[in-house]
Image (cartoon, rainbow, N blue to C red):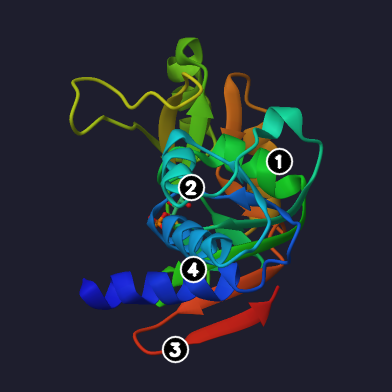
Amino acid sequence: MEDVAAAKRRAGRSAAATVDDGAVVGLGTGSTAAAAIRALGDRVDAGLDVVGVPTSYQSRTVAAAAGIPLAEIGDRDRVDVAIDGADEVAGGDAIKGGGGAHTKEKIVATAADRVLLVVDERKVVDRLTAPVPLAVVPAARGTVATRVAAMGGEPTLRAAEHKDGPVVTDDGNLLIDAAFGPIEAPATLAASLSEVPGVVEHGLFVGVADELHVGTTDAVTVSQL
Ligand code: A5P
Protein backbone atom coordinates (compact mmCIF):
# COMPACT_ATOMS: atom_id res chain seq x y z
CA MET A 1 0.00 0.00 0.00
CA GLU A 2 2.88 2.34 0.80
CA ASP A 3 4.17 1.65 -2.72
CA VAL A 4 0.82 2.72 -4.18
CA ALA A 5 0.75 5.88 -2.07
CA ALA A 6 4.28 6.72 -3.24
CA ALA A 7 3.28 6.10 -6.87
CA LYS A 8 0.32 8.46 -6.47
CA ARG A 9 2.57 11.13 -4.96
CA ARG A 10 5.01 10.76 -7.85
CA ALA A 11 2.25 11.16 -10.45
CA GLY A 12 0.83 14.14 -8.56
CA ARG A 13 4.18 15.89 -8.26
CA SER A 14 4.92 15.30 -11.93
CA ALA A 15 1.70 17.00 -13.04
CA ALA A 16 1.98 19.83 -10.51
CA ALA A 17 5.49 20.57 -11.79
CA THR A 18 4.08 21.49 -15.23
CA VAL A 19 1.81 24.29 -13.96
CA ASP A 20 2.84 27.75 -15.17
CA ASP A 21 2.94 30.88 -13.08
CA GLY A 22 -0.37 32.76 -13.28
CA ALA A 23 -2.42 29.68 -14.21
CA VAL A 24 -5.99 28.94 -13.24
CA VAL A 25 -5.81 25.28 -12.20
CA GLY A 26 -8.69 22.81 -11.98
CA LEU A 27 -8.22 20.69 -8.87
CA GLY A 28 -9.54 17.15 -9.20
CA THR A 29 -10.90 14.85 -6.53
CA GLY A 30 -9.54 11.63 -5.01
CA SER A 31 -6.31 10.51 -3.40
CA THR A 32 -4.05 10.99 -6.45
CA ALA A 33 -5.47 14.43 -7.26
CA ALA A 34 -4.96 15.29 -3.57
CA ALA A 35 -1.27 14.39 -3.97
CA ALA A 36 -1.10 16.78 -6.93
CA ILE A 37 -2.86 19.51 -4.95
CA ARG A 38 -0.39 19.15 -2.07
CA ALA A 39 2.54 19.30 -4.51
CA LEU A 40 1.03 22.43 -6.07
CA GLY A 41 0.70 23.87 -2.56
CA ASP A 42 4.44 23.31 -2.06
CA ARG A 43 5.07 25.32 -5.23
CA VAL A 44 2.74 28.08 -3.99
CA ASP A 45 4.76 28.16 -0.76
CA ALA A 46 7.84 28.65 -2.94
CA GLY A 47 6.25 31.64 -4.74
CA LEU A 48 4.13 30.24 -7.58
CA ASP A 49 1.08 32.42 -8.31
CA VAL A 50 -1.98 30.31 -9.19
CA VAL A 51 -5.72 30.18 -8.58
CA GLY A 52 -7.19 26.74 -7.86
CA VAL A 53 -10.69 25.74 -8.95
CA PRO A 54 -11.88 22.82 -6.80
CA THR A 55 -14.13 20.04 -8.06
CA SER A 56 -15.50 18.92 -4.70
CA TYR A 57 -15.73 19.58 -0.99
CA GLN A 58 -12.70 17.28 -0.61
CA SER A 59 -10.47 19.07 -3.13
CA ARG A 60 -11.45 22.47 -1.72
CA THR A 61 -10.47 21.31 1.78
CA VAL A 62 -7.13 19.83 0.66
CA ALA A 63 -6.31 22.92 -1.41
CA ALA A 64 -7.19 25.33 1.39
CA ALA A 65 -4.96 23.38 3.78
CA ALA A 66 -2.18 23.53 1.17
CA GLY A 67 -2.48 27.33 0.99
CA ILE A 68 -3.73 27.55 -2.61
CA PRO A 69 -5.87 30.64 -3.40
CA LEU A 70 -9.28 29.39 -4.60
CA ALA A 71 -12.10 30.36 -6.95
CA GLU A 72 -15.34 28.57 -7.83
CA ILE A 73 -15.99 27.17 -11.32
CA GLY A 74 -19.35 28.97 -11.27
CA ASP A 75 -17.45 32.26 -11.34
CA ARG A 76 -15.08 31.23 -14.16
CA ASP A 77 -15.66 30.55 -17.84
CA ARG A 78 -12.35 28.82 -18.48
CA VAL A 79 -9.46 27.06 -16.80
CA ASP A 80 -5.85 26.85 -18.01
CA VAL A 81 -5.06 23.34 -16.83
CA ALA A 82 -7.00 20.71 -14.91
CA ILE A 83 -5.28 17.95 -12.92
CA ASP A 84 -7.37 14.97 -11.94
CA GLY A 85 -7.25 11.28 -11.11
CA ALA A 86 -9.16 8.41 -12.73
CA ASP A 87 -10.51 5.00 -11.90
CA GLU A 88 -9.40 3.50 -15.22
CA VAL A 89 -7.59 4.88 -18.26
CA ALA A 90 -7.47 3.22 -21.68
CA GLY A 91 -5.85 5.25 -24.44
CA GLY A 92 -7.43 8.69 -24.42
CA ASP A 93 -10.52 7.58 -22.51
CA ALA A 94 -11.15 7.27 -18.78
CA ILE A 95 -13.73 6.28 -16.21
CA LYS A 96 -14.07 8.69 -13.29
CA GLY A 97 -16.46 9.11 -10.42
CA GLY A 98 -15.18 6.63 -7.86
CA GLY A 99 -15.39 9.54 -5.44
CA GLY A 100 -18.74 10.68 -6.80
CA ALA A 101 -17.36 14.01 -8.00
CA HIS A 102 -17.37 13.40 -11.76
CA THR A 103 -20.08 15.96 -12.57
CA LYS A 104 -18.03 18.93 -11.42
CA GLU A 105 -14.82 17.21 -12.55
CA LYS A 106 -16.22 17.06 -16.08
CA ILE A 107 -17.41 20.68 -15.97
CA VAL A 108 -13.92 21.79 -14.94
CA ALA A 109 -12.01 19.45 -17.26
CA THR A 110 -14.01 20.41 -20.34
CA ALA A 111 -13.46 24.10 -19.53
CA ALA A 112 -9.69 23.54 -19.39
CA ASP A 113 -7.18 24.16 -22.16
CA ARG A 114 -5.16 21.17 -20.96
CA VAL A 115 -6.26 18.15 -18.90
CA LEU A 116 -3.67 16.09 -17.06
CA LEU A 117 -4.65 12.73 -15.59
CA VAL A 118 -2.63 11.47 -12.64
CA VAL A 119 -2.81 7.77 -11.78
CA ASP A 120 -0.79 4.93 -10.35
CA GLU A 121 0.02 2.16 -12.80
CA ARG A 122 -2.85 -0.11 -11.62
CA LYS A 123 -5.31 2.26 -13.33
CA VAL A 124 -3.96 1.85 -16.86
CA VAL A 125 -5.85 -0.84 -18.78
CA ASP A 126 -6.26 -2.02 -22.36
CA ARG A 127 -10.03 -1.65 -22.26
CA LEU A 128 -12.36 0.22 -19.90
CA THR A 129 -14.24 -2.32 -17.79
CA ALA A 130 -15.02 -0.69 -14.43
CA PRO A 131 -18.63 0.21 -13.63
CA VAL A 132 -19.55 3.65 -14.97
CA PRO A 133 -20.67 6.01 -12.16
CA LEU A 134 -23.87 7.90 -12.95
CA ALA A 135 -24.90 10.96 -10.93
CA VAL A 136 -28.66 10.69 -10.85
CA VAL A 137 -31.49 12.98 -9.74
CA PRO A 138 -32.94 11.18 -6.70
CA ALA A 139 -36.42 10.88 -8.22
CA ALA A 140 -34.96 9.05 -11.24
CA ARG A 141 -33.14 6.30 -9.37
CA GLY A 142 -35.66 3.63 -10.38
CA THR A 143 -36.15 4.70 -13.98
CA VAL A 144 -32.43 5.13 -14.58
CA ALA A 145 -31.74 1.66 -13.16
CA THR A 146 -34.36 0.21 -15.52
CA ARG A 147 -32.83 2.01 -18.52
CA VAL A 148 -29.32 0.84 -17.60
CA ALA A 149 -30.55 -2.76 -17.38
CA ALA A 150 -32.27 -2.37 -20.77
CA MET A 151 -28.91 -1.21 -22.18
CA GLY A 152 -27.32 -4.44 -20.94
CA GLY A 153 -25.80 -2.97 -17.79
CA GLU A 154 -26.06 -3.95 -14.16
CA PRO A 155 -27.06 -0.96 -12.02
CA THR A 156 -26.10 -0.69 -8.34
CA LEU A 157 -27.19 2.22 -6.17
CA ARG A 158 -24.02 3.25 -4.33
CA ALA A 159 -24.45 2.72 -0.58
CA ALA A 160 -22.79 4.97 1.97
CA GLU A 161 -20.23 3.36 4.24
CA HIS A 162 -20.63 5.41 7.38
CA LYS A 163 -24.29 6.32 7.04
CA ASP A 164 -27.39 4.22 6.45
CA GLY A 165 -28.73 4.54 2.91
CA PRO A 166 -27.18 5.81 -0.32
CA VAL A 167 -24.26 8.13 -1.01
CA VAL A 168 -25.50 11.67 -1.69
CA THR A 169 -23.11 13.73 -3.82
CA ASP A 170 -21.93 17.30 -3.13
CA ASP A 171 -24.70 18.40 -5.52
CA GLY A 172 -27.44 16.35 -3.81
CA ASN A 173 -27.62 13.57 -6.38
CA LEU A 174 -27.48 9.80 -5.96
CA LEU A 175 -24.94 7.54 -7.63
CA ILE A 176 -25.69 4.48 -9.70
CA ASP A 177 -22.68 2.39 -10.69
CA ALA A 178 -23.53 0.86 -14.04
CA ALA A 179 -21.48 -2.25 -14.88
CA PHE A 180 -21.33 -3.04 -18.59
CA GLY A 181 -18.28 -5.33 -18.60
CA PRO A 182 -15.58 -4.48 -21.15
CA ILE A 183 -16.70 -1.35 -23.02
CA GLU A 184 -16.16 -1.82 -26.77
CA ALA A 185 -17.24 1.67 -27.85
CA PRO A 186 -16.89 4.26 -25.05
CA ALA A 187 -18.14 7.17 -27.19
CA THR A 188 -21.31 5.30 -28.17
CA LEU A 189 -22.04 4.28 -24.58
CA ALA A 190 -21.33 7.84 -23.39
CA ALA A 191 -23.83 9.25 -25.90
CA SER A 192 -26.49 6.72 -24.84
CA LEU A 193 -26.02 7.43 -21.13
CA SER A 194 -26.26 11.18 -21.75
CA GLU A 195 -29.71 10.64 -23.24
CA VAL A 196 -31.21 8.93 -20.18
CA PRO A 197 -33.57 11.34 -18.38
CA GLY A 198 -32.46 11.90 -14.81
CA VAL A 199 -28.77 11.18 -15.46
CA VAL A 200 -27.05 14.43 -14.53
CA GLU A 201 -23.63 13.22 -15.69
CA HIS A 202 -21.85 9.95 -16.37
CA GLY A 203 -18.27 9.10 -15.53
CA LEU A 204 -17.04 8.29 -19.05
CA PHE A 205 -14.47 10.90 -20.09
CA VAL A 206 -14.03 10.22 -23.79
CA GLY A 207 -11.13 12.07 -25.38
CA VAL A 208 -11.13 14.70 -22.62
CA ALA A 209 -7.59 14.18 -21.30
CA ASP A 210 -4.46 15.53 -23.01
CA GLU A 211 -1.66 14.08 -20.91
CA LEU A 212 -1.25 11.05 -18.65
CA HIS A 213 1.14 10.97 -15.68
CA VAL A 214 1.55 7.40 -14.42
CA GLY A 215 3.35 6.86 -11.14
CA THR A 216 5.13 3.59 -10.41
CA THR A 217 7.08 2.51 -7.34
CA ASP A 218 10.22 4.25 -8.55
CA ALA A 219 9.40 6.45 -11.58
CA VAL A 220 6.83 8.42 -13.54
CA THR A 221 5.96 8.08 -17.19
CA VAL A 222 4.30 10.95 -19.03
CA SER A 223 2.48 10.42 -22.32
CA GLN A 224 0.45 12.63 -24.62
CA LEU A 225 -3.05 11.31 -25.29
C1 A5P B 1 -13.55 11.27 -8.07
O1 A5P B 1 -14.94 11.30 -8.29
C2 A5P B 1 -12.90 10.36 -9.05
O2 A5P B 1 -13.13 10.72 -10.38
C3 A5P B 1 -11.42 10.20 -8.76
O3 A5P B 1 -10.65 11.08 -9.50
C4 A5P B 1 -11.07 8.78 -9.05
O4 A5P B 1 -11.97 7.95 -8.33
C5 A5P B 1 -9.64 8.45 -8.68
O5 A5P B 1 -9.45 8.49 -7.30
P1 A5P B 1 -8.12 7.95 -6.62
O6 A5P B 1 -7.00 8.79 -7.14
O7 A5P B 1 -8.33 8.14 -5.14
O8 A5P B 1 -7.99 6.51 -7.00
Distance from the alpha carbon under mark 4 to that under mark 3: 12 Å
Q: Which is in the foreground here, disc 1 or disc 2?
A: 2
Distance from the alpha carbon under mark 1 to that under mark 4: 31 Å
Amino acid under disc 2 = Ala
**Number of the label disc, if any, that sits on residue 12:** 4
Q: Residue 125: x, y in percent? A: 48, 72
The answer to whether the residues at label 3 and label 2 have Cβ atoms under 8 Å apart is no
Amino acid under disc 4 = Gly
The answer to whether the residues at label 4 and label 3 have Cβ atoms under 8 Å apart is no
Q: Is mark 3 within 8 Å of ligand 1?
A: no
Name the side, left or right, on which 54 lies relative to 163: right
Q: Residue at x 50, y 57 (%)?
A: 37
Badge 4 or badge 2: first in the primary sequence? 4
Query: Which residue, given by chain and number where applicable, does mark 2 sit on?
Result: 63
Image quadrant where one finds the C terminus:
bottom right
Query: Which residue, given by chain and number where applicable, does mark 3 sit on?
Result: 219
- Where on the picture, by quarter, is residue 199? top right
Task: Give above or below for 54 relative to 126.
Answer: above
Distance from the alpha carbon under mark 4 to that under mark 2: 13 Å
Identify the secondary structure beneath mark 4.
helix
The answer to whether the residues at label 1 and label 2 have Cβ atoms under 8 Å apart is no
Query: Which residue, given by chain and number where applicable, does mark 1 sit on?
Result: 191
Q: Sort mark 1 into few (<14), some (14-19) or many (20+) by Cα contacts within 10 Å.
A: few
